[in-house]
């Protein structure tokens, strides 16, 4: 009984103190009454096909976005679509290419605005335009990637880079951390630790804070994440799709799209064939929104990726795409009387008990 009275008295005293306390004045004194509002959510639109299949406009600005999946499943197509969309909105794409599979001709084909530099003989000498590009020539480690991003954000803050920035990293899992490099051993635990330290505790916070109205710029980080397939944990269990480089970026991301299947790419190739020659002009692939903390929509569907971007898995759209490109294919095949064939592509992907080195 005495305990109940004591509790009741304590609550009454606390209520009395609170009634006389000016919380607004306290927050003002401590500088806690400003900069709490976030900007309205904007999106970098991707292709109509991506929007139709996922029910999502595209890439959410001011967020960490992961595009993950096995090789050749549409991740780079989505990344380039985002870059093209950014250029049209005067947002500066920043390409960080550490996997070294980049193809300028493909980017141009998809609509990226690029100035091709040529010498007097007409040979291509370089590419330039409204973008920034770095690769393994200067970026060797996870720490290099993080340092490069932070440097550009610092330059932006100083007023030396007056653009919203769209960072596009291809890919997580393609470069080790500095400790792995120095020891000449690609240690997955060290790499995961570096991702957590360099990005989880630093870069990612700078990116997401740009969503606040107090920030004059809005910056976005889109990462392609390499994956591996983990063995089922029990005879009745199922294999799992795991991210290379640990899960620091998964936890910090607000939007994750997975392309392909868990145990294989799960694509089907669509080809034009004539007299032993062939042009692979499209692939059907599964696409799934696995994580969406923007508006909660998670979807799964099937899309067709082409050298020009995504199109709907629809007979009418495929027929139109063939019609638009038949002349180019005929040059390779030696005529327009070719056959269209489709074949399922099942890559034999190994399952592992732990992340492969």
Image: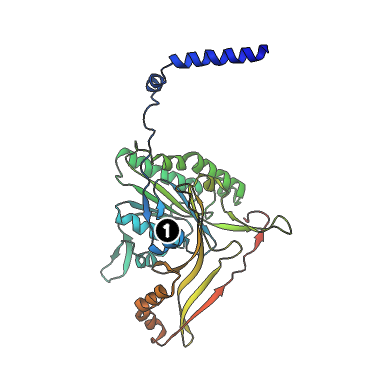
Residue 72 visible within the image: no
Work out whether residue 244 or residue 126 is closer to the camera in this orientation and state it: 244
Q: Position of residue 74 (x, y in %)?
A: 47, 63
Residue at numbered disc 1: 79
Of the 4 image quadrants, the one containing the N terminus is top right
Residue 325 visible within the image: yes
Work out whether residue 15 or residue 214 is closer to the camera in this orientation and state it: 15
Instruction: Specify the farthest residue to the right.
Output: 235
Work out whether residue 255 or residue 203 is closer to the camera in this orientation and state it: 255
Q: Position of residue 287 (x, y in %)?
A: 50, 61
Image height check: is 19 above or below 272? above
Say whether residue 170 is left or right of residue 125: right
Q: Position of residue 216 (x, y in %)?
A: 32, 40
Instruction: Specify the farthest residue to the left.
Output: 120
Kind of element beneath mark 1: helix
Image height check: is 316 above or below 287? below
Q: Position of residue 329 (x, y in %)?
A: 39, 80
Q: Residue at x 51, y 67 (%)?
A: 285
Say whether residue 88 is left or right of residue 241: left
Q: Residue at x 61, y 47 (%)?
A: 189
Work out whether residue 2 or residue 228 is closer to the camera in this orientation and state it: 2
């Amino acid at each position: 009984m005495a305990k109940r009275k004591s509790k009741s008295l304590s609550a009454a005293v606390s209520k009395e103190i609170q009634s006389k306390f000016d919380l607004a004045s306290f927050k003002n004194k401590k500088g806690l009454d400003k900069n709490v509002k976030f900007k309205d959510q904007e999106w970098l639109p991707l292709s109509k096909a991506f929007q139709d299949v996922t029910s999502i406009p595209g890439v959410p600005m001011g967020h960490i976005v992961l595009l993950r999946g096995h090789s050749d499943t549409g991740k780079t197509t989505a990344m380039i679509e985002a870059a093209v969309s950014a250029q049209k909105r005067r947002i500066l794409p920043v390409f960080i290419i550490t996997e070294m599979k980049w193809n300028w001709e493909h980017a141009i084909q998809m609509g990226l605005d690029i100035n091709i530099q040529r010498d007097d003989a007409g040979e291509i000498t370089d590419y330039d335009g409204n973008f920034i590009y770095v690769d393994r020539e200067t970026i060797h480690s996870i720490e290099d990637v993080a340092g490069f991003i932070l440097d550009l954000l610092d330059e932006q803050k100083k007023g030396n880079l007056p653009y919203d920035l769209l960072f596009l990293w291809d890919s997580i899992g393609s470069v080790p951390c500095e400790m792995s490099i120095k020891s000449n051993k690609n240690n997955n635990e060290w790499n995961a630790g570096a991702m957590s330290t360099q990005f989880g505790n630093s870069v990612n916070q700078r990116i997401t804070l740009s969503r606040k109205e107090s920030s004059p710029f809005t910056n976005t980080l889109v990462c392609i994440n390499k994956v591996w397939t983990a063995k089922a944990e029990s005879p009745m269990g199922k294999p799992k799709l795991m991210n290379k480089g640990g899960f620091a970026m998964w936890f910090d991301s607000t939007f994750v799209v997975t392309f392909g299947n868990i145990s294989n790419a799960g694509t089907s190739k669509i080809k034009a064939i004539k007299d032993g020659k062939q042009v692979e002009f499209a692939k059907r692939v599964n696409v799934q929104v696995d994580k969406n903390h923007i508006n909660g929509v998670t979807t799964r569907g099937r899309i067709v990726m082409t050298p020009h971007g995504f199109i709907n898995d629809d007979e009418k759209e495929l027929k139109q795409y063939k019609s638009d490109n038949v002349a180019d294919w005929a040059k390779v095949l030696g005529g327009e009387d070719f056959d269209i064939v489709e074949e399922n592509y099942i890559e034999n992907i190994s399952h592992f008990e732990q992340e492969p080195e």
